[in-house]
């Protein structure tokens, strides 16, 4: 069941509620991202793209691509000889993405049932998507499935801020995010979901455990901005462990 205000349920967000929320946010999503992260989101995505280690000519999948911000950075790395495909559940987000990066193919689809054959991509990315997926373990298993052996999955997600900075971060989340969201969106309900889903999300060690269970070896993570976000990197082994 979705929550009474029609937002996704934190912890097990229903795809229908997630789609409804992002449909209503789509036209202002990029502006809100920049304002709320004070422009840091671009730096986080650039680092995530770098960690894929993709080369010109490679084929990359960006899952939960949204408005295509990470797909655009990936496309610059693989060049016109390569290919980037973005997948998302929400058509309104994809419409913004298509206008932003016409060189990328954007496909409607579910992270838990990716519409691609096994071993199709050199790398797969997901930025700020995992927290919004109902079955996170299945989505990670799907990422591993579509990667070629030796390919990398790179997952950018909110994480846990360093304890010394936590009071300031909580003050920012409670006091500053809602008025900014009200100003840009005319309401702050979606950003109540954002702040509560961030604080309820798993610590990076648990995400690493999920990735290991999905078959990635090795798995590691990099914290950025004092732990505001983590970038998780896993490699699909060349020979699957028995
Ligand atoms: C917070 S946005 C992130 C967008 C983009 N990756 C970025 O960095 O800004 C989360 C996106 O995940 C998509 N999403 C959520 N659950 C999904 C699922 N099961 N399959 C595909 N996309 C999903 C939403 O539609 C939304 O566009």
Image: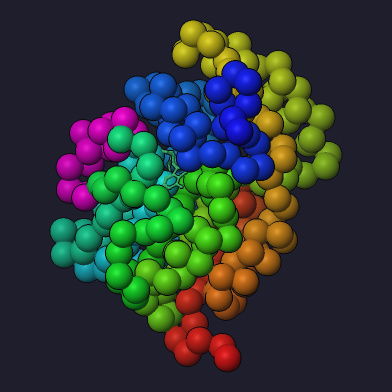
**Residue closest to the eye, 79 or 182:** 182
Q: Residue at x 61, y 52 (%)?
A: 230
**Residue closest to the eye, 128 or 39:** 128
Does residue 103 show up magenta in the picture? yes
Answer above or below: position of 27 versus 233: above
Q: Residue at x 70, y 50 (%)?
A: 202
Q: Main secondary structure of the magenta part?
A: helix
Position in image of residue 59 (x %, y %)? 27, 66
User: Quadrant location of the C terminus?
Assistant: bottom right
Chain part drawn in magenta: 92-105
Q: Residue at x 17, y 42 (%)?
A: 102
**Residue closest to the eye, 128 or 81:** 128
Image coloring type: rainbow
User: Quadrant location of the N terminus?
Assistant: top right
Q: Residue at x 34, y 73 (%)?
A: 118
View quadrant of ligand 1: top left
The answer to whether 146 appears left or right of 174 in the picture is: left
Residue 71 visible, this angle? no
Answer above or below: position of 176 versus 22: above
The answer to whether 162 appears left or right of 41 in the picture is: right
Answer above or below: position of 232 versus 20: below
Residue 142 visible, this angle? yes
Position in image of residue 174 (x %, y %)? 72, 20
Position in image of residue 162 (x %, y %)? 77, 44
Position in image of residue 164 (x %, y %)? 83, 39
Q: Quadrant of residue 234?
A: bottom right
Does residue 222 show up magenta in the picture? no
Answer above or below: position of 221 versus 182: below
């Amino acid at each position: 069941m979705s929550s009474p205000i029609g937002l996704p349920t934190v912890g097990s967000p229903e795809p229908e509620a997630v789609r409804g929320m992002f449909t209503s946010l789509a036209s202002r999503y990029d502006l809100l991202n920049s304002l709320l992260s004070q422009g840091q989101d671009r730096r986080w995505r650039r680092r995530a793209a770098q960690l894929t280690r993709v080369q010109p000519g490679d084929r990359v999948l960006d899952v939960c691509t949204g408005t295509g911000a990470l797909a655009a950075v990936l496309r610059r790395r693989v060049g016109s000889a390569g290919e980037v495909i973005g997948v998302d559940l929400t058509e309104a987000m994809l419409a913004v993405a298509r206008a932003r990066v016409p060189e990328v193919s954007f496909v409607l689809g579910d992270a838990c049932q990716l519409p691609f054959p096994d071993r199709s991509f050199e790398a797969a990315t997901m930025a700020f998507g995992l927290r919004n997926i109902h079955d996170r373990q299945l989505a990670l298993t799907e990422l591993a499935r579509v990667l070629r052996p030796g390919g990398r999955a790179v997952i950018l997600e909110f994480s846990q801020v360093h304890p010394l900075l936590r009071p300031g971060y909580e003050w920012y989340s409670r006091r500053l995010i809602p008025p900014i969201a009200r100003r840009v969106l005319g309401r702050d309900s979606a950003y109540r979901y954002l702040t509560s889903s961030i604080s309820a999300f798993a610590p990076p060690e648990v995400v690493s455990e999920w990735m290991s269970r999905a078959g990635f070896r090795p798995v590691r993570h990099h914290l950025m901005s004092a732990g505001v976000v983590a970038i998780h990197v896993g490699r699909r082994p060349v020979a699957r462990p028995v």
